[in-house]
Amino acid sequence: MPRTATDAAALSGAQRELERQLEERLAVIQELAPFALPSVDPVAYQTAATHRTAVEQITAALNRIAQGTYGLCSGCGRQITPARLEVLPHAATCIECQSHAETA
Ligand SMILES: [Zn+2]
């Protein structure tokens, strides 16, 4: 499916934002690494775990950009709204599927 110029611009914008977030998260994980053990600093451990989960989600989103499936819901296959992607660039599901997942 051909993309319009607007789509391409939005996509590269999302990619830049995701790459920036990825770098930030990796830096925090690296910083926390020496203390991020449950027996040393449980809070740092939790924080590092949260960042690692985010890194996985961001990496998956970057892979979707590479594969041309970015912005499509992994649940129902429909387009995720641009407003949602702006707030949550690594979103893998639309709001409907997300709320189903949360209530399930
Ligand atoms: Zn969906």
Image (cartoon, helix red, strand yellow):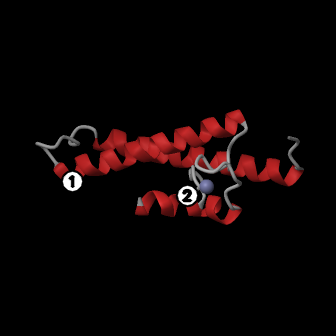
Q: Is residue 55 left or right of residue 32?
A: right
Number of the label disc, if any, that sits on residue 43:
1
- Name the image quarter holding the C terminus: bottom left
Q: Secondary structure at mark 2?
A: helix
Q: Nearer the viewer, residue 29 or 104?
A: 104
Q: Nearer the viewer, residue 64 or 20?
A: 64
Q: Looking at the image, is 85 positioned above or below residue 2?
A: below
Ligand 1 visible in quadrant: bottom right
Q: Nearer the viewer, residue 73 or 48?
A: 73
From the image, state whether disc 2 or disc 1 is nearer to you.
Answer: 2
Q: Residue 85 location in percent, x, y?
A: 63, 58
Q: Secondary structure at mark 1?
A: helix
Q: Residue 66 location in percent, x, y?
A: 69, 34
Q: Is residue 76 left or right of residue 59?
A: right
Q: Distance from label 2 to label 1 (Cα)?
A: 31 Å
Q: Looking at the image, is 92 positioned above or below residue 62?
A: below
Q: Which residue is label 2 attached to?
A: 97
Q: Looking at the image, is 44 positioned above or below residue 1?
A: below
